[in-house]
């Protein structure tokens, strides 16, 4: 029904040669991994070369960001058309680092998501509460606002092409993963909100969890009914580690 989607977000890591070396080491490790969508989001500088390295494999290329306009005076930005040119199948939008470090609003994220769909690139739309918001018991309110605002212009008939990533800000890069139950609670809430907006198609929309996902905790997260994948930062930087996440096998019982 929902194909699990495991995505590597390399953030601002890896030179060109490191990125190429990753692809060479990684592809043989995930050969034969069926029934999952595997996605690599390298920095923009490596999109072209990583994309070339993925030709002939089932691993898909993603951008970490995009600008909603097709062209113009936007120094430093890349348009959806440029990403399509590079062979991107997905692009991450509204990552918490973009929201918090670069001041991106829900409205801006929404324009990006809609512009990507026009180029047939699937947006991975990130939402997530900060620690302060969670402690103030505002998690659901924050998620609802981000979700509604960030998906506002998405046409209903394109809804199933969207991927939502729930990434609690307090779990990103901190080693502090949400428990599977806590993540599931928010994922179920997100699916319910998606159903309000998109009806029965909500059952086909994939919702990834992100925030300190590791080979050792991915199995329990993926076992939750509304967790359909993972968006992985730190643990996606090594081919061996990310290939284990792609398999999300039950960790060996340690003796
Ligand atoms: P992390 O990052 O896996 O290093 O916590 C996840 C993300 O920011 O997408």
Image: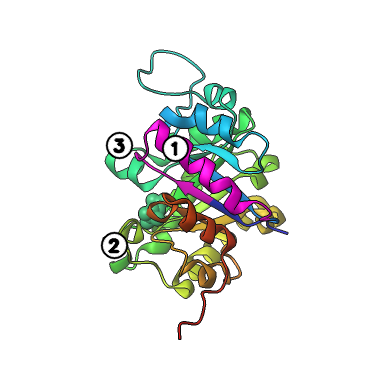
First in residue order: circle 2 vs circle 3: 3
| Magenta region includes residue 20 | yes
Tell me the residue that label 3 is attached to: 102
The tag earlier along the polypeptide, 1 or 3, is: 1
As rendered, which of 218 and 24 lies closer to the eye?
Answer: 24
Q: Quadrant of the N terminus?
A: bottom right
Q: Position of residue 5 (x, y in %)?
A: 59, 53
Q: Nearer the viewer, residue 13 or 153?
A: 13
Determine crowd level at label 1: few under 14, some 14-19, many 20+ residues with C-alpha closer than 10 A: many
Which label's residue is closer to the chain start, 2 or 1? 1
Residue located 68% across and 57% down the image: 2
Secondary structure type for disc 1: helix
Q: Which residues are magenta?
A: 7-33
**Residue at which label 1 appears:** 19
> Residue 35 is drawn in which quadrant?
bottom right
Q: Pointer 1 and pointer 3: residues touching (CB < 8 Å)?
A: no
Q: CA distance from mark 2 to mark 3?
A: 19 Å
């Amino acid at each position: 029904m929902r194909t699990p989607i495991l995505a590597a977000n390399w953030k601002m890591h890896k030179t060109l040669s490191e990125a190429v070396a990753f692809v060479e080491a990684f592809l043989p490790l995930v050969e034969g991994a069926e029934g999952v969508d595997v996605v690599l989001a390298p920095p923009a500088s490596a999109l072209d070369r990583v994309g070339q390295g993925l030709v002939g494999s089932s691993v898909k290329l993603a951008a970490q960001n995009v600008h909603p306009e097709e062209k113009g005076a936007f120094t430093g930005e890349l348009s959806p058309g440029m990403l399509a040119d590079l062979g991107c199948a997905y692009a991450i939008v509204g990552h918490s680092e973009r929201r918090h470090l670069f001041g991106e609003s829900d409205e801006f994220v929404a324009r990006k998501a809609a512009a990507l769909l026009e180029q047939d690139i699937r947006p991975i739309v990130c939402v997530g509460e900060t620690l302060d918001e969670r402690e103030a018991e505002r998690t659901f309110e924050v998620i609802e606002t981000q979700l509604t605002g960030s998906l506002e212009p998405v046409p209903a008939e394109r809804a199933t092409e969207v991927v939502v990533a729930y990434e609690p800000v307090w779990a990103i890069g901190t080693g502090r993963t949400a428990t599977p139950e806590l993540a599931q609670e928010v994922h179920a809430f997100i699916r319910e909100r998606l159903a309000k907006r998109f009806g029965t198609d909500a059952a086909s929309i994939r919702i990834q969890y992100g925030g300190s996902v590791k080979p050792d905790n991915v199995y329990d997260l993926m076992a939750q009914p509304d967790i359909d994948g993972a968006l992985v930062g730190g643990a996606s930087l090594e081919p061996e580690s990310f290939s284990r996440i792609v398999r999300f096998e039950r960790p060996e019982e340690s003796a």
